[in-house]
Amino acid sequence: MGTDDPPWEPPLAGTEVEHLLGALERLRATFRWKAADLGPAELAAGIPSSGLTLGGLLKHLACVEDVTFAAKLAGVAPGEPWQSVDWDREPDWDFTSAADDSPEELYALWDGAVARSRERVAAALADGGLDHPAQVVVDGVHASLRRLVCDLVEEYGRHTGHADLLREAIDGRVGEDPPPEMPW
């Protein structure tokens, strides 16, 4: 990363932490740019072959951020609105309920979840690095922070691709990265 590069540009030659978090931050920035500056109708707009919307993706990724780095990493409840949901009865609640939220609520929900995630990841890195054991246990094995970051990179990769298609259908916005002047 050069001195004139935007903050989401991963380093060309960095540590494992810098590369993993750089990849995640680049995907977060690209996703947020794809979902930025839209009103209620646009955030609720879909394409004929899918029920996905940018508003639904904002809310879903906010949920994934909180569940991954609160519940799975830190072993704490992910907080509201996630705790009150009957996920067995409404497994797609994060996607479908977004239509009831204002753009301001959706952007604040995602922005807040990302900020909390950054704090939790920084604390875990300071307490064991990428090998820091997460609270989630599968077959008697604790997942590592490294695994959780990789999982989130995969999740953002999938949904940023969805956001590309949805945003282009709304107003033609295309591109791989946010413009350098995007506030972050």
Image: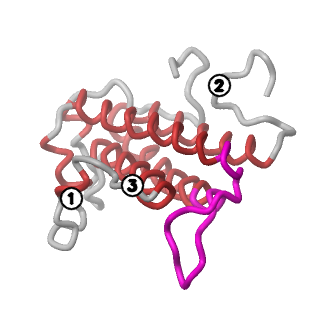
Q: Earlier in the sequence, mark 1 or mark 3?
A: 3
How many residues crowd mark 3 within 10 Å: few (<14), some (14–19), many (20+)?
A: few
Q: Quadrant of the N terminus?
A: top right
Q: Is residue 79 left or right of residue 18?
A: left
Q: Is residue 132 magenta?
A: yes
Q: Earlier in the sequence, mark 2 or mark 3?
A: 2
Report the number of discs.
Answer: 3
Residue annotated with mark 3: 76
> What is the three-letter code of the residue carrying label 1?
Trp
Q: Are marks 2 and 3 in contact (CB under 8 Å)?
A: no
User: Magenta segment: does it hold 83?
Assistant: no
- The secondary element bearing badge 3 is classed as loop
Q: Which mark is residue 102?
A: none
| x and y, in percent, of residue 72 in the image | 46, 61
Mark 3 belongs to which amino acid? Val
Mark pair 2, 3: CA separation: 29 Å
Which of marks 2 and 1 precedes in the sequence?
A: 2
Q: Say what secondary structure mark 2 lies in.
A: loop
At 75% across and 15% down in the image, what residue appears?
4
- Which numbered tag is attached to residue 7? 2
* Residue highlighted by disc 1: 93
> Which residue is nearer to you in this view: 94 or 177?
94
The magenta span reads 125-148
Which of 130/38 is in front? 130
Q: Within 10 Å of the Cα at label 2, are there few (<14), some (14-19), or many (20+) other Cα atoms?
A: some
Q: Secondary structure at mark 1?
A: helix
Return the x and y of residue 48 as percentages of the image width and height.
25, 56
Give the amino acid at mark 2: Pro
